[in-house]
Image (cartoon, helix red, strand yellow):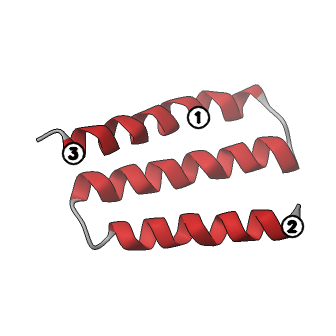
Amino acid sequence: MRLPIVGYAVIIGIMVSASFLTTLDIIIAAIMFAVSDMFVARDRFIKPSSKNALLITPLYFGAQALFAFSVSI
């Protein structure tokens, strides 16, 4: 799983980096999405905990809402 995880991390890193060329709402959404993915990875590969889910859910759905809001002008 190391190679797919590294590949995914690179893609997410590119997404976050590219977001800095756009608007503030997309930057915040990209960072929230990346942080939610870090908690997913922590939960799956390091230490499963219900605390992770408490952070994953609002970060992920908040990011999706901001992405949607950014295109519904």
Percent x, y of residue 59: 49, 38
- From the viewer's perspective, is residue 45 above or below residue 49? below
How far separated are the C-alphas under marks 1 and 3?
25 Å
- Relative side of 26 to 52, left or right: left
Could you tell me which residue is drawn at 66 percent across and 66 percent down? 9
Q: Earlier in the sequence, mark 1 or mark 3?
A: 1
Type of amino acid under label 3: Val
Residue receiving disc 1: 55
- From the viewer's perspective, is residue 57 above or below residue 38? above
Residue receiving disc 3: 71
68 and 31: which is toward the camera: 68
Residue receiving disc 2: 2
Percent x, y of residue 25: 25, 51
Q: Secondary structure at mark 2?
A: helix
Give the label, 1 or 3, closer to the camera. Answer: 3
Q: Earlier in the sequence, mark 3 or mark 2?
A: 2
Q: Residues within 10 Å of mark 3 (few under 14, many from 20)?
A: few
Give the label, 3 or 2, closer to the camera. Answer: 3
Percent x, y of residue 28: 35, 53
Q: Earlier in the sequence, mark 2 or mark 1?
A: 2
Percent x, y of residue 33: 50, 49
Q: Secondary structure at mark 1?
A: helix
Q: Residues within 10 Å of mark 1 (few under 14, many from 20)?
A: some
- Relative side of 59 to 1, left or right: left
Type of amino acid under label 1: Leu
Q: Secondary structure at mark 3?
A: helix
Could you tell me which residue is drawn at 21 percent across and 61 percent down? 23
Q: Give the position of the C terminus as an image quadrant.
A: top left
How far separated are the C-alphas under marks 3 and 2?
34 Å
- Relative side of 59 to 3, left or right: left
How far separated are the C-alphas under marks 2 and 1?
24 Å
